[in-house]
Image (cartoon, rainbow, N blue to C red):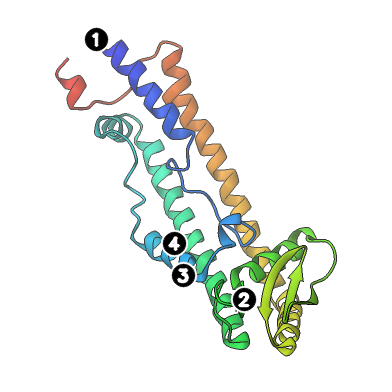
Amino acid sequence: MLRPHSDRLSEIYARWISINGFVDKVLDTTSYDIDCRVEKLESDLSNLKWSDPQKFDLAEYAVAHLKSGYSDLYQKIINLRRDVKSHNENVLRYVLSQCYRLREELGLPDWHGENRAYYSRIVWLVSRKILFNEPNGEPYITFKEAFYFLKWGGADLVITEGKEICEKGLKLIEELIEWEEYQITAIRKRANDLRKQVQKLREEARIKLIDFIRLGALVKGECDVCKEM
């Protein structure tokens, strides 16, 4: 009776381990998730604050087996989820702090209106320049149909009727590259360390929860379902 139960659990664990629900995606300032509206980043940070590292997107009986049969692995997953959550919160707070500073300096709406700026995109591209020397070339100002554009690597950063605002944007980008290199590099290093830990834990979970069972072992621990078998 436990053989079909074990095989079913192995399938459930295999799907779970392969998605971000196992451990959240690790962010850094070059993640594509960063290139979005400030209000979206604020919402992401708010949601992250309320997320529970102990709440798994798994059937209740699968969690019961994980807790009772693989307690060391269960605790490792929770601890790493907490570390990733804390790191991601720090990344979002840092990006938002830079966006707020840029918005205060430039005084333009974020992402909408005829006169507008893409604040998180500026932070994102500055980070990519510091870490990967991308995009090629330097930011530049161009003029088209009564508006000045501050662009970089083909992307719009500022669109405004006043050239002086684009010039101020250029200066702010130079300051970010000079002043924020240490912080951006440190965030990236921490993110890479966590990504390695996530990959290592995925492999451990895959061996214990999938490979051993597929080779004939029965799932460890117990749940309300198998207690009745």
Q: Position of residue 172 (x, y in %)?
A: 71, 82
Q: CA distance from mark 4 to mark 3?
A: 9 Å
Q: Nearer the viewer, residue 31 or 109?
A: 109
Residue at image coords 56%, 39%: 199
Of pointers 2 and 3, the one earlier in the residue sequence: 3
Front disc: 1 or 2: 2
Q: Which residue is mark 1?
A: 1
Q: Earlier in the sequence, mark 4 or mark 3?
A: 3
Disc 4 marks a residue whose amino acid type is Asp
Considering the numbered disc 2 on the image, is that residue within a helix, a strand or a loop?
strand
Gap in Å between the C-alphas at discs 2 and 4? 20 Å
Mark 2 Cα shell of 10 Å, populated few (<14), some (14-19), many (≥20): many
In primary-sequence order, the first of circles 1 and 4 is 1
Q: Nearer the viewer, mark 4 or mark 3?
A: 3
Sequence-earlier tag: 2 or 4: 4
Residue most extreme to the front: 145
Instruction: Identify whether 48 is placed above or below 14.
Output: below
Q: Along the line of sight, which residue is nearer the eye, 206 or 156?
A: 156
Q: Which residue is mark 3?
A: 39
Q: Nearer the viewer, residue 1 or 44?
A: 44
Give the foreground label among 2 and 4. Answer: 2
Residue displayed at 75% across by 71% down = 151
Q: CA distance from mark 1 to mark 4?
A: 44 Å
Check disc 1 and report its element: helix, strand or loop: loop
Q: Residue tagged by mark 2?
A: 117
- Residue under label 4: 44
Instruction: For label 3, count other residues whose C-alpha is less than 10 Å away and answer few (under 14), some (14-19) or many (20+).
Output: few
